[in-house]
């Protein structure tokens, strides 16, 4: 039985989707803990109500990013995870932390990577006149919003879209593809071939 630790900074809607899918679909895994860098993160309440262990590592209590990451790793490792899932975790992680969880840590980003890394992805997509947007689940590497792509979902950018309306449609897709990617990992269904993630049984890695 694989053990999953999820990191959040706020509401944690992707965390909720993963927790619900894990239970409903009978994954060979359990969510061992939900950890936040913010004591007021609403997602902690959801996790606690589901009987999941919760922890807080407040970044404001650490003088450096390295000190915060060291304490965060200590708390994560207490739960002996097979997989660390970043679900709206709004911290830039140090290379040493990323290396510690190499090929054991995943993230979701609200764009079709490698396009629009960083913040304000939906605004930038609209301003650039993109006709399609989406979300990407990827393994985490030291370079921000990079790393081997596991699955992507695409949505059209509509003529009257605002940043908010596009964000909501993309988020709905995130709730679809993030649990799928995590399930594939805990089922050992993925291979990494020359830096490209391939599903061993050929399941689609693009949702339209």
Image (spheres, grey):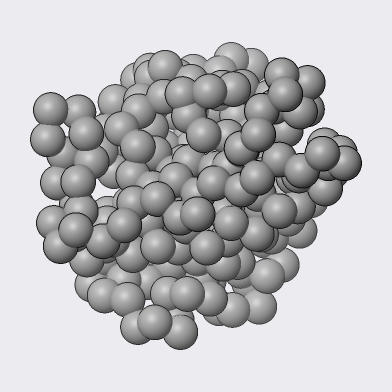
Q: Quadrant of residue 122?
A: top right
In which quadrant will I find the N terminus? bottom left
Specify whether 199 is left or right of 92: left
Image location (x, y in percent) of residue 67: 51, 21
Q: Residue at x 59, y 22 (%)?
A: 116
Q: How many dots with numbers?
A: 0
Establish if 80 lies above or below 52.
Answer: above
Image location (x, y in percent) of residue 119: 68, 24
Specify whether 201 is left or right of 10: left
The front one of 176 and 2 is 176
The front one of 196 and 6 is 196
Q: Is residue 165 visible?
A: yes
Image location (x, y in percent) of residue 112: 52, 34
Establish if 79 lies above or below 132.
Answer: below
Q: Residue at x 29, y 43 (%)?
A: 104
Q: Is residue 7 visible?
A: no
The front one of 151 and 140 is 151
Image location (x, y in percent) of residue 50: 59, 79
Establish if 49 lies above or below 115.
Answer: below
Q: Residue at x 22, y 34 (%)?
A: 196
Q: Residue at x 33, y 44 (%)?
A: 150
Q: Quadrant of residue 44?
A: bottom right
């Amino acid at each position: 039985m694989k053990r999953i630790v999820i990191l959040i900074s706020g509401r944690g809607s992707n965390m909720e989707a993963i927790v619900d899918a894990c239970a409903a679909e009978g994954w060979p895994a359990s969510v061992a803990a939900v950890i936040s860098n913010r004591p007021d993160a609403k997602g902690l309440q959801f996790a606690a109500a589901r009987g999941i262990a919760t922890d807080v590592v407040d970044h404001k209590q650490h003088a450096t990013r390295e000190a915060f990451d060291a304490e965060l790793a200590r708390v994560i490792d207490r739960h002996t995870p097979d997989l660390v899932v970043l679900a709206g975790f709004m911290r830039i992680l140090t290379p040493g932390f990323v290396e510690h969880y190499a090929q054991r840590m995943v993230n979701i980003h609200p764009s079709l990577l490698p396009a629009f890394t960083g913040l304000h992805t939906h605004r930038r997509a609209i301003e650039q006149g993109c006709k399609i947007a989406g979300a990407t689940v990827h393994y985490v590497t030291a370079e921000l919003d990079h790393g081997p792509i596991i699955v992507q979902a695409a949505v059209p950018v509509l003529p009257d879209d605002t940043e908010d309306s596009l964000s909501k449609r993309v988020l709905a897709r995130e709730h679809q593809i993030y649990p799928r990617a995590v399930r594939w990992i805990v089922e050992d269904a993925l291979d990494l071939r020359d830096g490209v993630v391939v599903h061993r049984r050929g399941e689609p890695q693009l949702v339209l």
